Image (cartoon, helix red, strand yellow):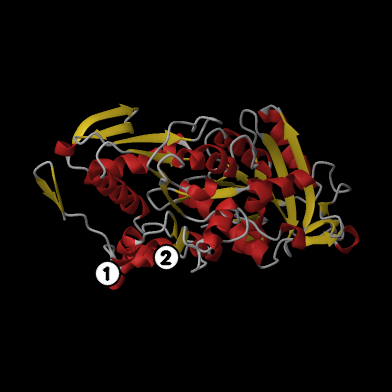
Amino acid sequence: MITANSQLIEFRLHPKQLEIYHDAHRYKLVQAGRRFGKTQLAWTICLIFMLQNPGCLLWWVAPLYKELIPATKTVRDITPKPWVKKQLENSEIIRYIKLFNGSECFFHSADREDSLRGSGIHGLVVDEAPILKQNRWESELKPSLIDYNGWALFIGTPRGTTWFTKLFTRGQDPLNMEYKSWQLSSYSNSTEQGGFLPKANIDAIANDMPELLRRQEINAETLEGEGVVFRNIVNRIKPDKEIKPYQIGEIIVVGSDLAKNVDYYVNIALRLNGEVVGFERYNKLDWPFMRKRGIEFCKRFGNAYLLIDSSGVGDPVFDELKREYGKVEGYKFTSPTKKALIENLSIMLDNGEITFPGNPETKEFSTTLNPDFNVLKTELESFTYDLLPSGLIHYGAPEGLHDDCVVALALAAFMIKQRKFIAPLGAFRFG
């Protein structure tokens, strides 16, 4: 409990948060799972420091502007209004707060390069530290702490092996007098361990994740790759000669992602053992030509079964295809259905159930199959995920990149996994 400005306030921290709060190291690195209470801990540390050091200056830095939203909510939740002398907001995000004793905290985002240089500060919180660029810390933020021998608290969930990992490792050395680091799972905040969340609430999020995502987001383990969904892609390459061309009579499935705006129209054909036997990719085709290309592609593989993205503008295209080509079904994209599609593909790739023709020695996909085929490899390796504040997982390509090939492959893989073909009727069904 703390009394300030004639008001008594109780700050509630669970045992692991208290351990971090009381630690005396200058640089503290907290690598923790979702719902651990990282933001609450960090602002509690800031607030108490500001109360105990009148006139001090702190910074709170997030890699992206949108990532200041959780901090804003926490500041509002646990900062007594009578303590606030001045507060500035921009689009409902707090950018500056000044307490009654003259202590100040600025909330910055690192969206723009070279924007974090300033006068000396007494302390600093780096939010989502694993995704901040290394030079922002070394060239801009760390020098700002020199004047007052300031402290820094790094918080975040791991995002693969980064510069933050090296700092974290430094903090694991018990002989290091400046750095201290903690790896703490989400369950540290469970009521069973003295925390505030029922274990069942954390289980509900954890059980809905693939293993790798659960290890990273819940257990706070450092995995290779930054939010990577698909791994070991090059280990799924088979020599061209080992993947036979299409054989008349065999069942082939085709996944088709329709072009929208600047995206690409992609068709990918798989045989039932998961081997890719066909790939094509086009840009700026009108809908009638897309339908024609799609039907021609399927006929190359003995009237293959076709599954297309029938969301939004895909609906009329699907209706036309259904009239012209019987062996087609639509897949409606929502957050849950895309999640199911992508996670099925991730599991099949992990299990070696999907293979690509190419050259295992050079790690390249087959240019014989299609000159653009390596675009699929690039998209798979760059495809990422993000866990939303609601606990839902969002999958997609990084900003500025495409995921059309990934979606087409995922649709074809989904058909293989479902195995709901009705051969006598020459059709198939889902659901």
Going by the numbered disc 2, the residue's amino acid type is Ser
Does residue 234 appear in the picture of this structure?
yes
Viewer-proximal residue, 34 or 53? 53
Taking 95 as reference, is 368 left or right? right
Coordinates of residue 107 in the picture (x, y in percent): 38, 35
Instruction: Point out the residue furthest to the bottom here.
Output: 192
- Residue 194's label in the rendered image is 1
Mark on residue 122?
Answer: none
Gap in Å between the C-alphas at discs 2 and 1?
A: 13 Å
Q: Which numbered disc covers residue 185?
A: 2
Please name the residue shown 59% across and 51% down the image. Answer: 163
What amino acid is found at the position of numbered circle 1 in the picture? Answer: Gly
Q: In this view, does 361 lie to the left or right of 326?
A: right
Q: Which of 143 and 4 is in front in this view?
A: 143
Residue 204, percent across and down? 38, 63
Task: Report crowding for label 1: few under 14, some 14 to 19, many 20 or more residues within 10 A (C-alpha).
Answer: some
Residue 102, quarter of the rendered image: top left
The residue positioned 85% from the left and 42% from the top of the image is 371
Farthest left residue? 6
Among numbered discs 2 and 1, the one appearing first in the sequence:
2
Residue in the image at 57% along x and 33% along y: 316
Q: Quadrant of the N terminus?
A: bottom left
Q: In this view, does 73 lie above or below 91?
A: below
Picture coordinates of residue 231, whole percent (x, y) = 66, 59
Q: Where does residue 337 sit, x and y in percent of width and height?
A: 50, 51
Quadrant assignment, res 398: top right
- As drawn, 36 above or below 408: below
Is disc 2 surrounded by few (<14), some (14 to 19) or many (20+) residues within 10 Å?
Answer: many
Inspect this view and state whether residue 63 appears. Answer: no
- Left or right placement of residue 85 versus residue 256 in this view: left
Question: Label 1's element?
Answer: loop
